[in-house]
Amino acid sequence: MEAGEPISCAISPASSMSMSCRVERAIEDGALFLTIHHENGGFRRLRVMEDGSGVTAADGADDARITVFDGEIEVELGGDHYLLPATITATDAVQ
């Protein structure tokens, strides 16, 4: 059984968007983190900013670039793209 909710993603610049990633929410030290799992076993961790400004990369050297759409945000990290709900809450987060 796969954990997390499915989201649309494109892993690598040459890929097209598909519902092939899954996102899990977790609370760590009072902050909300998202772990996005790739179909190939890779993953990315994002920290949800408390001020509502979006997300930042929680690990690694890549900066998260965010584009806001109606009801969604596109996050680009190192050539990978993810579509997330524009409002991300701690609902269903593991504590």
Image: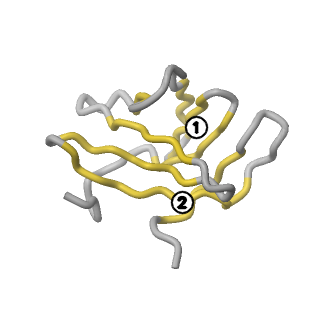
**Label 2: element kind:** strand
Q: Most extreme residue toward the front, as rendered? A: 41
Task: Tell me how the rendering is colored.
Answer: secondary structure
Residue 59 point in image, percent of width and height: 43, 31
Instruction: Tell me the residue that label 2 is attached to.
Output: 22
In the rendered view, does 78 fall on the left or right side of 47?
A: right
Count neighbours of disc 2 (C-alpha within 10 A) and say few if under 14, some if 14 to 19, many if 20 or more: many
- Tell me which residue sits at (60%, 31%) in the image: 76
- Tell me which residue sits at (44%, 49%) in the image: 35
Quadrant placement of the C terminus: bottom left
In the rendered view, does 20 fall on the left or right side of 24?
A: right
Look at label 2 and name its amino acid. Arg
Asked if residue 41 is positioned above or below residue 50 in the image, the reply reads below
Q: Most extreme residue toward the bottom, as rendered? A: 1
Look at label 1 and name its amino acid. Glu
Residue 38 point in image, percent of width and height: 62, 53
In the rendered view, does 83 fall on the left or right side of 85?
A: right
Say which label, 1 or 2, has the lower sequence index: 2
Q: State if disc 2 and disc 1 touch (CB < 8 Å).
A: no
Closer to viewer: mark 1 or mark 2: 2
Residue 54 point in image, percent of width and height: 39, 32
Instruction: Tell me the residue that label 1 is attached to.
Output: 74
Q: Nearer the viewer, residue 64 or 37?
A: 37
Mark 1–mark 2 Cα distance, whole angstroms, equals: 15 Å
Asked if residue 11 is positioned above or below residue 4 in the image, the reply reads above
Give the quarter of the image for residue 81.
Answer: top right
**Label 1: element kind:** strand
Q: Most extreme residue toward the right, as rendered? A: 14
Give the quarter of the image for residue 10.
Answer: top right
